[in-house]
Image (cartoon, rainbow, N blue to C red):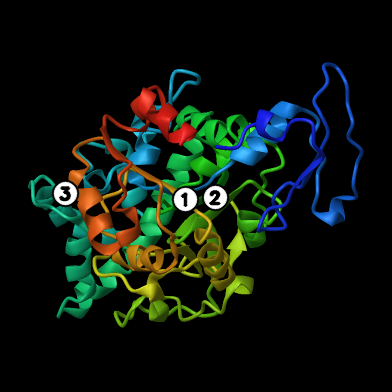
């Protein structure tokens, strides 16, 4: 393992495989002395100011973080107030109005989704319930009325998770701690895939560093950031404007987004009215057996992700079931052998690990750990500290 002592007394230049990585020209770290000078920003190099910063740079790892619904569900902590009625829902809570009555006013604005909720609320109480499989049945239903009703589901989810993003908490402390530990405290380069539509992780990044703004699609994958965010299934703040009203067509997600013409067609704003038939949220309906066509983030986001995955040596999976087979195939084709893989969930995560390992040979690593209890507890546990040190 490289240390500052290992390079003491020499002029050392650290050059990364990516031009985004910090380049370092370092001299012996005499106490209270400085031997650095500034390079132009365009050179891609930033001069370190201390031996400690050099050590962090030498030891820095690239990590892939995957966030699912369980992560957002557990994203708040005691550092800020929160409104429990707007806690980010798990899959089986999305349509269970008796358990989440605050959702009803939003659901009523989408008659098709409200009709399907009459069944979804009941079957979601079954131990074998899978929202993705049930919605796939509606998507492929023989009855055209059921198919059209399903067309209201993405609109409902966009409106609901938009309200959740703006109302749940003033500070998603769990997400802030996660980002701080990975980026600010230990200097990891982070590729973060979120399967969630909400904007809570973006809020955490802005709290950590005001330079993390998301005014345009390219802000999510900017080369000069230590953390890039890939919203494979879209976002509550992304929408397209329809030129004319079209009925739901069940021939796949690309038909649903027949007006989607690439990243220039997507607009970013907060608080759009998705009950307006002329505005469509860019979110992938949660369906079983997704294909690559269900990635609705811009193509250049996927290209950046594919390129950056090749450098990731650690994997941290929080709050997802592992049913996103299209994502697993992407990871299997790009990830190198992982040094460590941690799986975190509210409940037993052994099934999630099994799904990942059965598709992605690279995560069958000697250093793999499973944590039950949720993200908030994991961040307070020694297991997370071990992950940071690997």
Badge 3: how crowded within 10 Å, few (<14), some, or many (20+)? some
* Residue 121, label in figure: 3
The residue indicated by pointer 1 is 313
Whether tag 1 and tag 3 are in contact, CB under 8 A, the answer is no
* Residue 224, label in figure: none
- Does label 1 or label 2 sit earlier along the sequence? 2
- Does label 2 or label 3 sit earlier along the sequence? 3
Residue 114 at least partly seen: no
Query: In the figure, 153 relative to 381: above or below?
Result: below
Query: In the figure, 73 relative to 295: above or below?
Result: above
Badge 2: how crowded within 10 Å, few (<14), some, or many (20+)? few
Location of residue 340 in the rendering, given as x and y in whole percent from the top left corner? 38, 44
The residue indicated by pointer 2 is 271
Residue drawn at 54 percent across, 52 percent down: 229
**340 left or right, relative to 148:** right
Location of residue 25 in the rendering, given as x and y in whole percent from the top left corner? 82, 42
Location of residue 312 in the rendering, given as x and y in whole percent from the top left corner? 49, 53
Query: In the figure, 21 relative to 175: above or below?
Result: below
């Amino acid at each position: 393992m490289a240390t500052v002592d290992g390079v003491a007394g020499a002029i050392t230049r650290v050059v990364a495989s990516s031009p985004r990585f910090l380049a370092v020209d370092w001299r012996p770290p005499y106490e209270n002395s400085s031997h650095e000078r500034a390079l132009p920003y365009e050179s891609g190099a930033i001069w370190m100011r201390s031996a400690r910063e050099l050590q962090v740079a030498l030891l820095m790892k690239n990590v892939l973080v995957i966030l699912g619904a369980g992560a957002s569900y557990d994203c708040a902590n005691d550092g800020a107030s929160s409104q429990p009625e707007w806690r980010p829902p798990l899959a089986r809570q999305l349509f269970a109005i008796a358990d989440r009555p605050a959702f009803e006013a939003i659901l009523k604005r989408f008659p098709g989704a409200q009709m399907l909720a009459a069944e979804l609320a009941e079957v979601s109480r079954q131990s074998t319930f899978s929202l993705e499989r049930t919605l796939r049945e509606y998507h492929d239903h023989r009855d055209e009325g059921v198919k059209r009703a399903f067309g209201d589901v993405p609109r409902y989810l966009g409106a609901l998770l938009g309200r959740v993003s703006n109302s749940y908490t003033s500070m998603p402390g769990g997400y802030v701690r996660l980002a701080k530990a990975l980026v600010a405290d230990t200097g990891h380069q982070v590729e973060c895939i979120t399967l969630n539509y909400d904007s809570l992780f973006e809020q955490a990044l802005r709290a950590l560093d005001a330079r993390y703004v998301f005014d345009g699609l390219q802000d999510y994958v900017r080369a000069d950031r230590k953390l890039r965010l890939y919203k494979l299934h879209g976002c509550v703040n992304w929408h397209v404007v329809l030129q004319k009203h079209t009925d739901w067509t069940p021939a796949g997600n690309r038909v649903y987004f027949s007006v989607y013409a690439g990243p220039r067609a997507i607009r970013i704003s907060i608080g759009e009215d998705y009950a307006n038939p002329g505005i469509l949220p860019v979110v992938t309906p949660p369906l079983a057996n997704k294909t690559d066509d269900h990635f609705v983030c811009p193509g250049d986001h996927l290209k950046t992700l594919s390129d950056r995955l090749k450098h990731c040596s650690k994997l941290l999976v929080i709050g997802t079931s592992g049913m996103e087979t299209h994502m697993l195939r992407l990871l299997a084709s790009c990830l190198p052998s992982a040094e460590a893989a941690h799986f975190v969930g509210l409940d037993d995560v052994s099934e999630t690990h099994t799904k990942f390992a059965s598709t992605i040979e690279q995560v069958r690593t000697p250093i793999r750990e499973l944590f039950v209890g949720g993200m908030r507890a994991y961040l307070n546990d020694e297991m997370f500290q071990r992950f940071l040190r690997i």
